[in-house]
Structures are given as C-alpha cells and as structure tokens.
Amino acid sequence: MESNLQRALEAKKFVVTAECGPPKSADRRVIEEKAKLLKDWVDAVNVTDNQTAVTRMSSLAACAILKSWGLDPVFQITCRDRNRIALQSDILGAYALGIRNVLCLTGDHQSFGNHPQAKGVFDLDSVHLLETVKKMRDEGRFLSGDELTGERPAMFIGAVENPFAPPYEFRALRVKKKVEAGAQFIQTQIVYNIQRFREFIARVGDLGLLNKVYIIAGVSPIKTPGAARYMRDNVPGLDVPNEIVARMEAAGKGIEDKRARAEAWRQEGITICVEIIQQLKEIEGVSGVHIMAIEWEEAVPEIVQRAGLSS
Amino acid sequence: MIVADQKPIEEILQMLEPYRKVLFLGCQSCVAVCMAGGEKEVGLLAAAVRLARKQQGRPIEITEGAVKRQCDDEFNEPWAQTIQQHEAVLSLACGVGVNKLSERFDVPILPALNTRFFGEVERQGVWAEVCAGCGNCILHLTGGICPIARCAKNLLNGPCGGVRADGTCEVSRNGPRPCAWVMIYERLGKLSQRQNIENIFAAKDWSSDRHGGPRKRVREDMLLET
C-alpha cells in the first residue's frame, strides 16, 4: 500500500491531514516552504484545486512537488473545470507522478472566483467522479467502458460532505451514496458546532457506514473575531455558534497594543481548535482531523502538539 | 416559452448605424408574451429609434410589423416583398427567428433581443428558467423539479455543501433562489417518493444535449414528398 494516509487509517491511528493552497503564481518555492512547515506533523496534505474558483497553480503540479519532498499528497480534483475526458486523464497522470490519494469534489461555482465569466463544466458531479476513479482502479475501465491498456491507478479515494448544510437528515444518505460510489474516506466541512456534528455521525452510524468509511473531521483555527463573525454570517454551509464568536471577541478585550491583541486572538483561535479536536477524538467513528489553516500553516504544529496528536 | 430581453438602445442604434430604411419585425409568440418583441414592443422601439436618429440629424425610415411565428417560413413568406424593399431587418424575435429570416433573405437581419432561456412565469413580471432542454427528461424521478436547469452546477446527486441555512442556493444571481435539491427533497417527501433519490443517478449522456452538436428533430411521417 503506497498511500501513507490509507496505511495510517488502517492501522487505526487518529490521523492528521493539513491543507496546502497553491499560490497565484508559478513559484514552486511557495509549495516547498509549506512542505517544510508541515512535513513532520501530518500524515497527508491536501492540495486544493483552484479553491473558491480562483485561478492558482494546478493541484496536480503542487501535489507532485509535495511528493518530491516526501509528503503524501491528497490530490483534490473538481468537476467544475474538467469534463470526464480531462478528469480521467488527470487521474492517470497523477498516479504516474506518484500521487496515491484523490479527493473528488464537484467544486465551488465559478461565479465566486476571479473569472466569473468562465463556462462551468460540471459534466460529472462528485458522485460520478468517485464511481469513475473506482472503475478505473478496480475494473481497469474508463467511465465509458473502454479498457485501460496497462497499469491501473490504485488510488485511495476520498470525498467530502457538509453536515452543516440542509437538508441535515439527508447528509448521511449522501455519504452512503458516496461510499457506494467508491469513497473510502470522507472529509467533512469545518466543525464548529459539535452537537450538530454528533447528530450527523449518529445518522451515518445508523446507515451502517462507520465500518465502511473513514470519517476525517474538518477543523480550522480562527484568526480574528472578524473572521469568526464573517464565517457565521456570510459563508453558506458553515455553522459557527455565537459562543465561539463571543470567545474570540473576549480574547482581545482590554489589550491596547495591536500586536499583542492579534496574538491573543490567535492563541484563543488555536485553543478553540484544540478543544474541538479533543471532543472529536472522543466521538466513535471519527478517524482523524483535517486541519484547514488557510495561509496560516505555521499554526499546524502547535495545534497538533497541543491536541496530543503525534505524527 | 422562450424568454428574451431587449438589447440596450445604444447597442441597437449602433447596429442600425449604416442603415436609413429598416423593417422592424416583431414576433407574436413567446417574445410577445414575455413583453420583449411583440407588436407593442416594435412600436415602442421604433419610436425611440426614430427620435434618437432625428436628434443625431440622421433620420431613419422604419416600417413596423409583426409575424405570428418568425421561426416558420410559412408565416414569414407574406413579408417577403416588404423585407426585400428594406436595407435591413431588425428582428424582435428570439434568435431562432433571426436565423430563420437570415436563411431565407439576402438582407442583413439584426437581432434586437438577447435570447435568454425557456422559462415559466414565476409571477407578474418575473420569468424563471426551469427546463434546460437537455433532451433526456428525468422529471418523473425528481418530483417535477429539474436539477439540470435549476441547480447552478446541474448536479444529479445533490445537494452540494453550498446550501444556506434557509435552504437557498449560495449562487444567487438575480436574488436568492431556493436550492433545487432541497426543493426536490421536500417535494419527494410530500409525494412519499424519497426512495427515488436514495440511489445514485448515473452520469448523464450529454450527447442528447447540444454537446452532441446542433440538434435536429425529424418526423419521417410528416415529411412531404419532394
């Protein structure tokens, strides 16, 4: 088994993954810097695919760079920009470059990005993409049924789900569809509302899925009270309880010095994140956490250490 | 019906710039119903263009008319002579009408409208896209609500994670709209048909959509001997 992530999950380790957003440039050093920061602390690193539809260095290229630095990359691939021909081609290319994990997503709509004039593809959706990768790997056939002519892409296949978007009771069923389609691990939207996450896991358990798929819970440290409020009020599909916003606001109260205040906020953000991880560790059926410290990769080692997660 | 918008008057004036004698030809079908290109709109637009050209010191002669259905030669033919007596035709039909006239007449046919979509009357003055004409209908399985037309990502296995807490879609062009998959879920609940979406909808064959190339429908039994 060549996927470090799969090996760790199968060994019942509580895994830690992190996120690496490629730069809006052709500079490979940005990826290398992130690789150095994360290398000793995580089991695998997700590379986002033009997240929020903003054009960046390709996920595939950044994954290959991470691989050359000895990390285990998770190739995020979305259906927004590629039809089934390009998707399958990139899966083959990724495997040939040594990439062993793939996370199949539909992708953020192009209207949110820096090219809202773009034509969205959406030939397949994430469920179809999962089926396609599984078929290539297990049957040696493309989606159309046409045969691969040699080595199959033996990918460890992942998907995402958002427990915090309605209809809440349907989300577990959607996990079931994704597992049937080929998902071996599920990465969730960022957890701030633990109660709602527990309800989601219970429903996933009721469908008998917890021994069929690894659930990796998304977490993310908050940098400022403003960010907490913004996520609470303006980001569809995120559920940030008022209590967390209040804690972030309280952390900076009475601190005059700007730098000291920012540092106090960051510390509180990390503390909240660590507390959430500790609660997640206690939930049966949760196999690890995915830390999304977006443009704040330096926070990852501290979070991992304080949460008592070893790599 | 086919829903269209009239182009901005500046753009129309620019198209008409080289011409002094133009036929403004509306269509009395879809675009009349959605108040973009019927007889009434022909009159209003002609008045506006005459006034603008007069102010520019370059008056224009406009003949006004409207055809029952510009997408069909049968209804355009009575206008043949009139069309040929003009330097150009400004068509207030949908794009189908513009193409149809262009195939038949050696006169420039200019589009006065931007053809948008086929839609329903959501309420007075509001039209919404609810069918994409993909050529392979699954509405019997989705409670009569089309995910191809009404989901921004045309998901067949939705909803995605971008549903707001109130059930609206995060892609809110022209104001908030309900998530198509939340609508499907709720509607199937009412109809006791949720089992329809418990299984995976297979990847779509888009060749029945326009991705298979421009489409044509032939009814052999309707063809006239030639």
Image: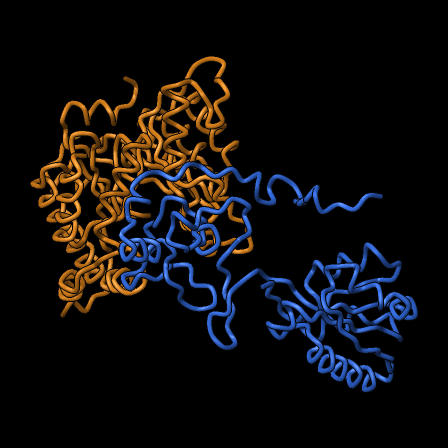
Which chain is blue in the rendering? B
- Residue found 37% across the figure and 36% down from its top: A104
In the displayed structure image, the side of residue A94 where residue A260 appears, left or right: left
Image location (x, y in percent) of residue B55: 81, 86
- Residue A246 location in percent, x, y? 15, 65
Indicate the chain coloured orange by its letter. Answer: A
Q: How many marks?
A: 0
Residue A68 visible in the displayed image: no
Location of residue A254 with respect to B214 vertically, above or below: below
- Above or below, B66 relative to B220: below
Residue at the limit of the structure toward the top, as seen here: A150
- Between A27 and B124, the residue placed more toward the observer is B124
Residue A31, percent across and down?
39, 36
Residue A236 lies in quadrant: bottom left
Q: Which percent across, then down, holds residue A261?
A: 19, 62
Residue B8 vertical position relative to residue A305 in the rendered view, above or below:
below
Frontmost residue, A178 versus A162: A178
